[in-house]
Amino acid sequence: MTVRSKILEALQAGPATSTEIADKTGEMRGRVKVALVTMVKRNMVSREKIVREGKGPKSQYCYKLEE
């Protein structure tokens, strides 16, 4: 199974961040992020920026299947 197909399968359950997708698929987060960038460019998935509070990065992207 390819990284892309694993990502598409993981997103069937609903929107998720790259970290959540990596956890669901068992793939390394870096590989997931590279695949997601390509998938966004090809309009396979869309992304929405979310602003977080607390420690760590203040924003991240949530990915979902393109309708």
Image (spheres, rainbow, N blue to C red):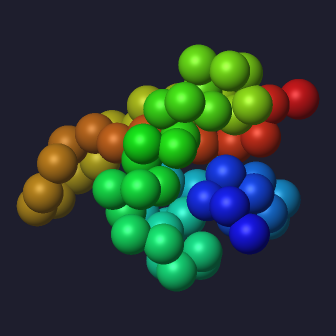
Choose top left, top right, bottom left or bottom right for residue 7.
Answer: bottom right
Lateral position of residue 11 relative to residue 62, left or right: right
Answer above or below: position of 51 versus 52.
Answer: above
- Name the spot of residue 48 as percent of width and height, x first: 53, 30
- Quadrant of the frame with the N terminus: bottom right
Q: Residue furthest left?
A: 55
- Name the spot of residue 10 as percent of width and height, x first: 72, 65
In the image shown, does 40 or 5 lie closer to the viewer? 5
In the image shown, does 32 or 51 lie closer to the viewer? 32
Lateral position of residue 14 relative to residue 33, left or right: right
Q: Residue furthest front?
A: 1
Lateral position of residue 62 relative to residue 33, left or right: right
- Quadrant of the frame with the C terminus: top right
User: Taking the image as drawn, is residue 39 in sight?
Assistant: yes
Going 29% across and 48% down the picture, which residue do you hit? Answer: 52
Going 23% across and 51% down the picture, which residue do you hit? Answer: 53
Q: Tally the marks.
A: 0
Going 62% across and 33% down the picture, which residue do you hit? Answer: 39
User: Taking the image as drawn, is residue 11 in sight?
Assistant: no
- Name the spot of residue 5 as percent of width and height, x first: 75, 57
Going 60% across and 27% down the picture, which residue do you hit? Answer: 40
Choose top left, top right, bottom left or bottom right for residue 46.
Answer: top right
